[in-house]
DNA sequence: TAATTATGACGAC
DNA sequence: TCGTCCTAATTAC
């Protein structure tokens, strides 16, 4: 169930734990047996995220493309090396996650989860074996008795080294592509501010929106217009911008759209660095801590239908748009 | 035990 | 606009 931020975090995990290593691929579920066989035994040479899609390259020139869809997830197990920014926002360490302390400071070093499920920037003692599920959020599932673990449920593909495994379940896409096919997929994707926040990328987004009569609430979910935005970020971005979801793309000013793009870049960075879809980051420290703990306190409008708007008190509206639930404030976003 | 739900996307009309 | 695909956790009965 991930939007763009989680795919970037998962890709970091592959970079940390699989890059440069020989990987055994299998399909415990059986449905991806042929694809797994094409990559089995090869060294992973790259791990990239673009919007909601992830691409893993192997030393025979082929790529694994994965899209988690609405409820896909990766389970990492074994002696997992956590990206520092992932470890710092995980589990009990969430307490330390105060505003500003860990935003925008990726890659400070490795950390290994210890047996208590906590971590330290400098791992204490021998690394233990754990299992972490990465979807929209990350959470530790359990400690491992043996490695590799028995596959649980419908595991489409398992990637395995001598110390770490990664199980994929529920993806909407999982396929082997050659470089030309990867290029074809990438060509259809709009800009991802996590990869490119240049003025050119911003202009690509602004121009794409201003060309179309389509409602902005639909355009933000269109991955060829902008990459990585899903149903939560759509609702929250439009509220933050005070834009009516029904406004046609072409009716919006370039200035308003540039601000929208920059806010997406900002929220995405927050999501990538904290692992939470925090869309109310303008809070005081205490409220921020509360919001990081409780999802219900983390958003302006998402899943708040019928509740009073946090700004004006008007009841938040729920309607269908693009076959998805759209939440918005009819007064603030008039 | 069954129904419901989900933070996606595609193809057929 | 609708149906379909993918899976598991949560909620209702």
Image: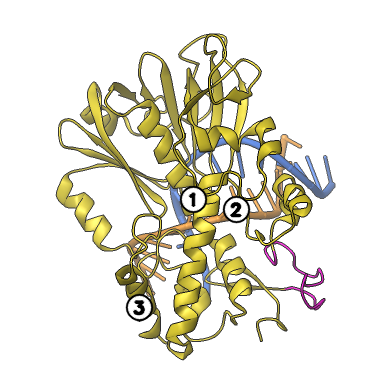
Chain colours: A yellow, B orange, C blue
Q: Secondary structure at mark 1?
A: helix
Q: Chain of mark 1?
A: A
Quarter of the picture containing the C terminus of chain A is: bottom right
Relative to the observer, which residue lies in front, A29 or A121? Answer: A121
Please give left or right for residue C11 compared with residue A196 in the image. Answer: right
Residue A110 location in percent, x, y?
46, 27
For the point 65% across and 42% down, the residue is A97
Residue A110, relative to residue A1: is it above or below? above
Relative to the observer, which residue lies in front, A123 or A207? Answer: A123
For the point 50% across and 49% down, the residue is A104
Please give left or right for residue A99 compared with residue A168 in the image. Answer: right
Q: Secondary structure at mark 2?
A: loop
Residue A43 location in percent, x, y?
23, 25
Q: Which residue is mark 1?
A: A5
Mark-to-mark CA distance, 2 and 3: 25 Å
| Circles 3, 1 touching at the beta carbon (< 8 Å) | no
For the point 60% across and 68% down, the residue is A235
Mark-to-mark CA distance, 3 and 1: 22 Å
- Which label sits on residue A277? 2
Residue A41 figure quarter = top left
Mark nearer the N terminus (3 vs 1): 1
Mark nearer the N terminus (2 vs 3): 3
Please give left or right for residue A42 compared with residue A79 in the image. Answer: left
Q: Which residues are magenta?
A: A300-316
Relative to the observer, which residue lies in front, A130 or A293? Answer: A293
Residue A252 on the magenta segment = no
Residue C12 location in percent, x, y?
82, 49
Q: Which residue is mark 3?
A: A208
For the point 35% across and 85% down, the residue is A211
| Circles 2, 3 touching at the beta carbon (< 8 Å) | no
Residue A179, relative to residue A317: is it above or below? above
Q: Chain of mark 2?
A: A
């Amino acid at each position: 169930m991930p939007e763009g931020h989680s795919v970037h975090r998962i890709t970091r995990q592959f970079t940390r734990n699989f890059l440069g290593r020989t990987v055994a691929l299998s399909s415990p579920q059986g449905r991806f047996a042929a694809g797994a066989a094409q990559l089995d035994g090869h060294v992973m040479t790259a791990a990239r995220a673009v919007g909601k899609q992830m691409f893993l390259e192997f030393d025979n020139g082929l790529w694994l493309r994965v899209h988690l869809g609405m409820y896909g997830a990766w389970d990492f197990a074994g002696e997992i090396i956590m990206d520092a920014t992932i470890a710092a926002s995980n589990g009990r360490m969430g307490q330390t996650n105060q505003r500003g302390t860990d935003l925008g400071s990726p890659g400070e070093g490795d950390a290994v989860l210890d047996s208590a499920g906590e971590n330290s920037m400098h791992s204490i003692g021998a690394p233990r074996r754990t299992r972490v599920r990465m979807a929209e959020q990350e959470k530790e599932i359990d400690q491992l008795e043996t490695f590799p673990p028995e596959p649980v449920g419908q595991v489409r593909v398992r990637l395995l080294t001598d110390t770490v495994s990664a199980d994929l379940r529920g993806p909407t896409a999982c396929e082997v592509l050659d470089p030309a096919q990867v290029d074809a997929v990438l060509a259809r994707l709009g800009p991802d501010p996590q990869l490119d926040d240049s003025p050119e990328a911003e202009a690509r987004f602004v121009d794409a929106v201003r060309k179309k009569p389509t409602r902005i609430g639909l355009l933000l979910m269109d991955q060829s217009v902008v990459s990585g935005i899903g149903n939560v970020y759509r609702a929250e971005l439009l509220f933050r911008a005070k834009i009516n979801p029904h406004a046609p793309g072409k009716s919006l000013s370039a200035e308003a759209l540039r601000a929208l793009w920059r806010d997406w870049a900002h929220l995405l960075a927050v999501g990538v660095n904290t692992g939470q879809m925090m869309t109310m980051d303008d809070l005081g420290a205490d409220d921020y801590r509360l919001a990081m703990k409780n999802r219900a306190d983390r958003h302006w409008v998402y899943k708040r239908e019928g509740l009073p708007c946090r700004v004006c008190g008007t009841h938040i509206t729920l309607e269908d748009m693009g076959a998805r639930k759209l939440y918005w404030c009819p007064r603030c976003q008039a």
